[in-house]
Amino acid sequence: MSKEQLAHFAIILGSLKNDLMADIERTVHTMQDEQTVFADPNDRASQETDMALELRNRDRERKLVKKIEQTIDRIKADDYGFCDKCGIEIGIQRLEARPTATLCIDCKTLEELREKQTAKYTPSGAPTKRPVLRLAFCFTTQAGGLHHPTRLP
Ligand SMILES: [Zn+2]
């Protein structure tokens, strides 16, 4: 990749990161503004759900920011645009669509296929074996060998 191309992606990634950071900032402010305590428990519950959703979104955004930062580091280290698996150039077209891509389209497709395959064969899909109960056996041995019920004369 040429110096100009690297600079081009550095700009794209930089503005992507800024947008995300601004978004995160906004969410924090909205959440602080919405610290109202509702009297109705239903309102409170839905407020809590909203909060949980926001937090999860924010978590995802933070991860994305981290990934963007790592990608910018790779540009600086002149290691940008190569597939992590096979080492070939990822290709400008794919990077334009997905500037943080670390795999070429072939490796990505293979990985997705493999993920689908493993998802298909997870233990949850297999029939579960129930443990066999041997309660009756326990009753006879607990008394120390054979247990004869005492008979009254
Ligand atoms: Zn590859």
Image (cartoon, rainbow, N blue to C red):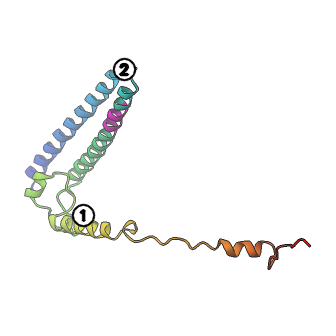
- The residue at the point 80 percent across, 76 percent down is 147
Mark 1 or mark 2, earlier in chain = 2
Q: Is mark 1 within 8 Å of ligand 1?
A: yes
Q: Is residue 141 above or below residue 70?
A: below
Q: Which residues are magenta?
A: 48-55
Name of the residue lying farthest toward the right: 153
- The residue at the point 38 percent across, 23 percent down is 40
The answer to which image quadrant residue 110 occupies is bottom left
Which secondary structure is most common in the magenta stretch?
Answer: helix
Q: Is residue 20 above or below residue 83?
A: above
Q: Nearer the viewer, residue 13 or 37?
A: 37
Q: In the image, is residue 50 part of the stretch drawn in magenta?
A: yes
Q: Position of residue 56 (x, y in %)?
A: 33, 41
Where does the N terminus fall, quadrant-wise? bottom left
Q: Is residue 43 visible?
A: yes
Identify the element where label 2 is drawn.
loop
Q: Is residue 66 above or below residue 128?
A: above
Q: Position of residue 15 (x, y in %)?
A: 16, 39
The circle on residue 36 is: 2
